[in-house]
Amino acid sequence: MPTAAPEPAGRRPPVRDPEAPRRVTLLELFFDLVYVAALALISRHLVGSVSWERAAESLVMLMAIWWTWAITTLVTDIYDPQRTEIKLLIVAVMFGALLMTTAIPEAFSSRGLVFAGTYVAIHLGRGLFLMPAVRRHPQSNQRALRIFVWFAVSAVPWLVGALAAHGTARLLLWFGALAIDYLGFRLAYPVPVLGAVPDSQRNVTAEHLSERYQQFFIIALGDAVLVAGTVFSLHHSEVENLAAFTVAFATTLLLWRIYVHKSGELLPHAIARAAQPSRFLNTAPYTHLMMVAGVVTTAAGFDLVLLEPTGHTPPAWLAVILGGPALFLTGRAAFEYEVFSRVSSSRPGGVLALLTIAPAGLFLAPVYASAGAMLVLAGVASADYRRSRGRPPEEPMPPH
């Protein structure tokens, strides 16, 4: 009996072949360029007028920008980025993310609708694009529908906040919208009748997903490098400028070193060894968001220190200078637990050390407070090195 002819590639749903390699494509790397500008503008917004309200605004914008990247990364893990329709989708999201980026400086004033409207359009538009594209693949179609429903619900507080609210009211509405978006992902997007996305449809590819998260962390470090290389005060001596620059560079290097040490290197192996790879899908966006937020806050601290390395350190400045590394170490501890099912004492120890030096920082110049944070990170990196020196490579042991 003759076999049926294979379906033409153009008529097949753009779902990845499970056996195909999932290396990151050049288009995905090109897509990431938008986020270099986005993170830089968010860190600049934070230091425009350092306050708790500014910090909350910056966090909302970072969470929104991050979610456009994280969900697009999962799309490129599930669907074939070599297919023309998926390439068009990536380019469309890139355009939307860039438009959101342009609105960051005035997102909580005159350009709130541009920021929120574009965010909503990205997520709803992706669903409207994917559902007909995968209509011949019932599982993918139902998954796209579930996700679309959740983003349709969160669109209401996003748009109400942009159109009818200002100040604190807008901030609370947008926080609520993000809570819906993040909770929907964590719960696997349950909807009436269809239920939640089954675990069998939430497996991830170790090689692709780990590489993408590593790349975004490097983008976040790029924000710190950008600040260190461009924000030099002309009102101070060259010695003061050079000291602040050296501290900023060394801190950036230490953030990279602490991230990649063991956990960063072994992330793809840990995902591959996990009994349920979908567990990483559930946790990786949150742990990496925390680390990225720590790096962005640290970069904002560089901005303050490079512009005013001497003089008095206001409490709000100290919260940024020391809070960035503390937030990074907290996220790094959670990341380590993802990979090894344990947390090294140097992580909470580093956070405790930052809290301990905080009172003294109020009486020191900003450059000395920044140097104190750098020394704490150097201690964490040194503890990592001593723990692993002379020992065989540690095998990842993901949580069960």
Image: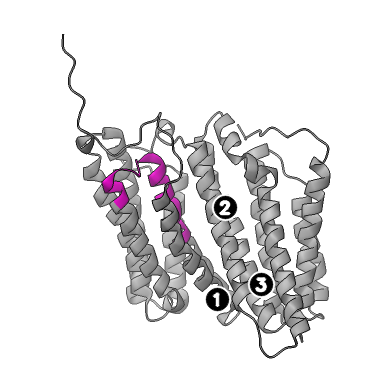
The residue positioned farthest toward the top in the image shown: 1
Q: Which residue is mark 2?
A: 288
Check contact, mark 2 vs mark 1: CB within 8 A.
no
In the rendered structure, the answer to whether residue 82 lies left or right of residue 394 reads left
Q: Which residue is mark 1?
A: 44
Q: Nearer the viewer, mark 1 or mark 3?
A: 1
Instruction: Give the numbered dot on residue 320.
Output: 3
Rendered image quadrant of residue 393? top right
Q: Earlier in the sequence, mark 2 or mark 3?
A: 2
In the rendered structure, the answer to whether residue 309 lies left or right of residue 24 reads right
Check disc 2 and give the amino acid type.
Answer: His
Residue in front for this viewpoint, 271 or 246: 246
Residue in front for this viewpoint, 195 or 297: 297
Extent of the magenta region: 65-87
Q: Crowding at label 2, few (<14), some or many (≥20) Cα neighbours within 10 Å?
A: many
- Residue 266: x and y in percent read 63, 39
Instruction: Give the numbered dot on residue 165.
Output: none
Q: CA distance from mark 1 to mark 3?
A: 12 Å
- Residue 91: x and y in percent read 33, 57
Residue in front for this viewpoint, 271 or 385: 385
Kind of element beneath mark 3: helix
Residue 67 among magenta residues: yes
Q: Label the magenta part by its dominant secondary structure.
A: helix
- Residue 104: x and y in percent read 44, 73
Residue in the picture at 71% in, 64% down: 251
Residue in the picture at 66% in, 43% down: 263
Q: CA distance from mark 2 to mark 3?
A: 19 Å
